[in-house]
Amino acid sequence: MPISSIPVDQLNEQQAAQELARLSAEIIAHNTYYHTDDAPVVTDAEYDALKKRNLAIEQRFPSLKRADSPTDRVGGAVQDKFEKITHKVSMLSLDNAFSDEDVVDFTDRVRRFLKLPADTTLAFTAEPKIDGLSLALRYEKGKLVSAATRGDGSVGENVTANARTITDIPHVLHGDAPDVMEVRGEVYLSKEDFAELNRRQEAEGKQTYVNPRNTAAGSLRQLDSSITASRPLRFFAYAWGDTTALPATTQMGVVERFRDWGFVINPLMGRFETVDGLIRQYRLIEAERAGLAYDIDGVVYKVDDLALQARLGFVSRSPRWAIAHKFPAETATTVLEDIEIQVGRTGALSPVARLAPVTVGGVVVSNATLHNEDYIQGIGNDGQPIREGRDLRIGDTVTIYRAGDVIPKVMDVDLTKRAADSKAFVFPTECPKCASPATREINEKTGRMDSVRRCTGGLICPAQAVEKLKHFVSRNAFDIDGFGDKQAEAFYHSGLVKNPAEIFTLQARDNASELQKLKNREGWGDQSAAKLFDAIEARRVVDLHRFIFALGIRHVGEGNAKILARVYQSANGFVDAMKAIRVEDSDAWSDLVNIDGIGPTVAHALAEFFAEPHNAGIVDELLTYVKPRDVEQVAQDSAFSGKTIVFTGSLERMSRDEAKAMAERLGAKTAGSVSKKTDLVVCGPGAGSKRQKASDLGIEIIDEDEWFVRIAE
């Protein structure tokens, strides 16, 4: 059986290391497309499935962690034409399940985290996953005061005037409601209303719309609210954000109160106490899908008990207590017209299929992922044949499938339609942008060749330089308004901005120039130039984790950037520690790899980045222009503040994840291994080598009961 097919709980340590190597390479490549290029080449379902498996393996084998679990960015950038609203409670998205087995795994994970015996009843809700636009409605004293789109999950667009035109959204809540209540749900167009809208468009000789979801999103984002009012948008309420109180102690109970307050809730939502019940509801909703008045793409399951939701908390970008069970993908046949090689900021050469446009599930698609050169040749990441070894060639007739996104995946090829003179695709061994050698590295742990081929040009490769610049200004890094991909490319190629530090000298250089003013360049004017300079000025102070993430260091995504920020606490502390890494037996190296969640792969990437004089120089120069915010300990007055704690053994009163989260809330740092830097080791039954090492080093050792006594003091 290929390693990629083995359930996570059945992997041995060697298999887990091999699987993490495969997943790391694949996820990093897709991150470039999705987060840097804003042009994903895989479906949301496929991307989330990769991250989900990667996270599960890392949780089971924390010592093997070679990269952070990618945190899928939520939503998209906030449009400049709207005011911004910051969500007091982030609007996150859900992990996905694609099979009944995934649902079973999800419920098992919840039980393991909560340490619930198999015979303990655990209730879940199940409801259709509406294919619409997420909206947060804030009510104060029962009156609607604002409405915001999801945006990037942290900041959304203020669409209050438009939301007021939707008849399903009450302006005043009926009955008693908390002083502050943020109700969340989905804005959508019914299938019938969408069809009628297109009939009107055709009658007026106008272009028709592609699908209800995009049309609903566009309708809600109109500057003229009368246009929004002319389109019959609808709203289902199903969740909440900031509130001064909750009207019930269960998911089902709160949603039922939404109905009492005047909202429409989905009639197919139900409560179930078994996995079989959830799956039966999924089958029921799937069977009724075609006859529903609205589009759905799956069923969402949530732990019903809100106290258990709070215990479960969140991992990365998603709640542990919920999952979306997606419907099967839809397929279509088209022609593979070309294979384009793109170069990302880490030098990865990623092949993209250019397809003859085809409609899949009501959406026209023209691009697909080809993953890597092995995939094109018919070889999987585990070295085993895929598509029964059939390769992919330009001109082939291929089957594609789509699940939850407009970007499909190539599933198979029809050899009966292949031209007699067809030639196998030759993957380049030189970078198409700088002609430097493109190589495949050997993984030190597995001894296997990585599936991704990378340009070795580094700093001389313009593609990597431009992509790094795009990454630096991206929304989850410095998030500079008006400085997007197009501006990054234009500024780089014109010589205005060659590296991130030069962004912050742009205005001074512009002021000093009489002939090369930005406002005089094509596409710019007085107002747009002044707006960009203001946006840059506003980003001279950023959160430390954003600064670290923005540096574009390989294997350092948002998750690892947050870990590093929390540990080193200041930009100078982080940079000084990274520069101090010279050899693997140094104290700086030991401190780094001992951080829970940071493994040797990430440590090597950090060491290599700061060992390069050019990189270190850019960082130093950056710090003369920007001031990353120091990170404060969560609980400064805690007895554990600043302490490094290791949990080991089979904890009985809490799961390992709960224990770590508890310690971090108290201001402590958690580590995966014992070292001379460790302050305390908490042992459950079966603690072995870590307990012995702590004893040898004279580190204090306590059991779970003592831990709970101390945190209660």
Image (cartoon, grey):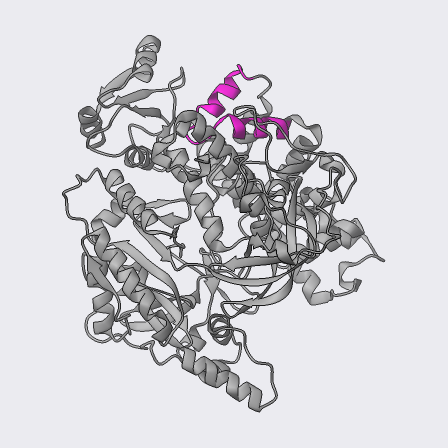
Q: Taking 429 as reference, is 339 above or below it?
A: below
As drawn, is 136 to the left or to the right of 122? right
- Queried whether the magenta region covers residue 600, the answer comes back as yes
- Queried whether the magenta region covers residue 274, the answer comes back as no
Outermost residue on the bottom side: it is 203
Q: Residue 91, position in %: x, y?
A: 40, 57
As drawn, is 25 to the left or to the right of 665? right
Where does the C terminus fall, quadrant-wise?
Answer: top left
Q: Taking 280 as reference, is 5 above or below it?
A: above
Where does the N terminus fall, quadrant-wise?
Answer: top left
Q: Residue 160, position in %: x, y?
A: 43, 73
Q: Residue 184, position in %: x, y?
A: 34, 65
Callout count: 0
Residue at image position (21%, 49%) is 307
Query: In the image shown, does 302 or 230 lie closer to the viewer?
Result: 302
Query: In the image shown, does 127 or 460 lie closer to the viewer?
Result: 127
As drawn, is 477 to the left or to the right of 303? right
As drawn, is 475 to the left or to the right of 680? right
Read off the magenta span: 584-610
**Residue 595 image-quadrant placement:** top left
Query: In the image shown, does 501 or 432 lie closer to the viewer?
Result: 432
Is residue 38 something that shows in the picture? no
Is residue 236 something that shows in the picture? yes
Outermost residue on the top side: it is 696
**Residue 673 image-quadrant placement:** top left
Residue at image position (17%, 39%) is 117
Magenta stretch: dominant SS? helix
Q: Taking 58 as reference, is 101 above or below it?
A: below
Q: Taking 63 as reference, is 557 above or below it?
A: below
Q: Residue 246, position in %: x, y?
A: 22, 60
